[in-house]
Image: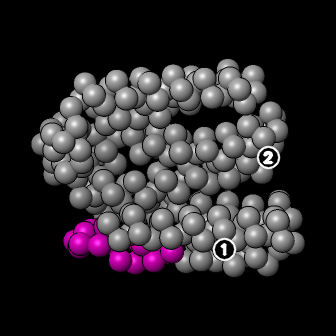
Amino acid sequence: TAIREIPAGQIKASSALVFTIISSALFMLSTYFINPLCFYLSPVALFVVLGYSYTKRFTPLCHLILGLGLSLAPIGAYLALTERFDVLPILFSVLVFFWVGGFDIIFALQDEEFDRSQGLKSIPVLMGKAKALRLSEAMHAVSALLVILGYNYGGFSWLYICGASVFIGLLIYQHLIVKPHDLSRVNLAFGTSNGIASVIFGVFVCLDIFLL
């Protein structure tokens, strides 16, 4: 986090604030032209996404707030296309909630000492590295179950199974390479494996929908 643009002094906080305000206004304006439901819900999405950055000041559940913010994507996309809620996109949103929350806990392991010294809150600060990893594993186990439920509920084919297998396999992989006493491969687990998992799973789901 310390090497990112604002902490590193590459971007002024005031410039970032102006950019955020303009982007938020454009976001709400764009939802107005999508459909009324998206427009009415846009402040909720902004509140969650923009509020996440402050949650480490008062709750160790900040990882879940990040998960909540990103979990709005599947249901948001579905609402934009259909202007209604449905079970499958909600299921995928819950999947994203547990998946993101789980891997953000892994990422936060390397900040435990700094967060503790600054009075910031996180699951690793609250529980310690070992128990935090166990919680992350449990959250990713729930994610894997939801991937399987998505197959059963959505009526997908073997293409979905291929993508889901890679996704679940990479969830397992990241927990095999990160240990409480060895955080040297946190970035590989947090960034690389999750990035690959999401792209492959998304591609196979799209292929399943449009080809079969």
> Magenta segment, which residues?
170-186
Residue displayed at 35% across by 35% down: 53
Q: Position of residue 143 (x, y in %)?
A: 59, 60
Q: Position of residue 100 (x, y in %)?
A: 49, 53
The image shows residue 180, relative to residue 33, as above or below, that is below
In the picture, the quarter occupied by the C terminus is bottom right
Task: Work out whether 157 lies above or below 82.
Answer: below
| Left or right, 54 with reference to 92 | left
Name the spot of residue 180 as percent of width and height, x first.
Answer: 27, 68
Q: Which residue is mark 2?
A: 87
Few, some or many C-alpha atoms within 10 Å of disc 1 (few <14, some 14-19, many ≥20)? Answer: many
Q: Is residue 67 left or right of residue 112?
A: right
- Residue found 77% across the figure and 51% down from its top: 88
Q: Horizontally, is 44 left or right of 206 in the view?
A: left
Residue 161 can be seen, yes or no: yes
Q: Are marks 1 and 2 in contact (CB under 8 Å)?
A: no
Q: For the point 81% across and 35% down, which residue is it?
A: 84
- Between residues 95 and 26, which one lies in front from this camera angle? 26
Please tell me in which quadrant of the rendered image residue 178 appears. bottom left
Q: Quadrant of residue 192?
A: bottom left
Mark 2 is surrounded, within 10 Å at the Cα level, by few (under 14), some (14 to 19) or many (20 or more) other residues, namely: few
**Front-most of residues 142 and 154:** 154
Residue 163 - label: 1
* Between marks 1 and 2 in the image, the one whose residue lies nearer the viewer: 1
Tell me, yes or no, whether the highlighted magenta stretch contains residue 41: no
